[in-house]
Image (cartoon, grey):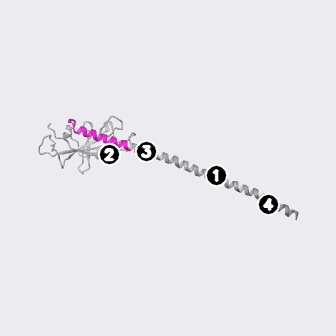
Amino acid sequence: MLRYAMGYAAMRASRPVAARTGYRGMALATVAIILLLLGALAFAGVRMLADHRLIASAYAQREHALRAAEYALEQAEHELRTSLAQPLHDMAVAAGSCGTGNQAGYCTADTHGRPGWSFARFHASGTAANTRAAGNDAHAPRYVVELLPDRHPGTPLALSGTYGPAPAVIYRVTAAGFSMDGDMPRMLQTLVRPAPFTP
C-alpha cells in the first residue's frame, strides 16, 4: 500500500514537469514559424525591390532607344531637305541591297518586293556598315533611306531633276535607336516628300 501511495505521488509530481516541457516545445515551434514567416516576408520585399529596379532600368533603356531613333529620323529628314540629298537621285544601288562607302544608308527593294531596309545591318559600324550613323557614339542611332514612287505627290519631282515624264518620288527613312549599352533596338519609319530641285 505504501509503494502504491509513493508511486501515485511520484506520478502526480511528474505531470507538471511534462506539461511545462510541452509548453516550451510549442513556444519554440511558434517562434520558429514566426521567424520563418518574417524571413519569407523580408526575402519577398528584397526580391520585389530588385524587380522594380530591373523594370525601371529596362523602361529607361527602351526610352533611350526610342529617343535615339527619333533623333536619327530628324537627322535624316534634315539631310534629305538640304542640298546634301541631291546625290540620292542618282544613286546606283543593286536591287535587294544597301550601298556601302559613300552610298551607305541608301537601300533598294529586291525583285520579290522585300523592302530595302530589311537588308540593312543596323548593328554594324565602321567599314562593315551599310547604314548611316546619326552621331559619333559607339551606339549612335543609324538609318537608311529608300526611294519610292510617290503615289500622291504634293510637288512633283522627277528623278532627272526636272518636271519631266519621270515619276515623282518619296523617301522612306527607317531608323534604329539603341539603349545606352547597345541593346534593345527600337525602330521607327517615316516618309519624307522632298522639295523639287533643278540640277
- Give the labeled residue for mark 1: 31
Q: Amino acid at mark 3?
A: Ala
Look at mark 4 in the image and give the residue it sits on: 12
Give the CA separation, mark 1 to mark 2. Answer: 56 Å
Report if residue 67 lies within the magenta region.
Answer: yes
Q: Is residue 16 above or below residue 168?
A: below
Which residue of the protein is positioned furthest toward the left in this rendering?
A: 164
Q: Which mark is residue 84?
A: none
Mark number displayed over residue 187: 2
Q: Nearer the viewer, mark 4 or mark 2?
A: 4
Quadrant location of residue 117?
top left
Of marks 1 and 2, which one's residue comes earlier in the chain?
Answer: 1
Q: Which residue corresponds to mark 3?
A: 56
Q: The residue tagged with tag 4: helix, strand or loop?
A: helix
For image coordinates 30% across by 40% down, the residue present is: 72
Q: Earlier in the sequence, mark 1 or mark 3?
A: 1
Name the element at disc 3: helix
Label 3 vs 4, first from the N-terminus: 4
| Res 20 → quadrant | bottom right
**Is residue 56 highlighted in magenta?**
no
Could you tell me how far apart the alpha carbons at marks 4 and 1 are, in whole angstroms? 30 Å
**First to last magenta residue range:** 62-84
**Label whose residue precedes the other's in the sequence (4 or 1):** 4
**Residue located at (54% from left, 48% from top):** 43
Which percent across, then down, holds residue 150? 19, 47
Give the Cα distance between marks 4 and 2: 85 Å
- The amino acid type of the residue labelled 1 equals Val
Amino acid type shown at disc 2: Met
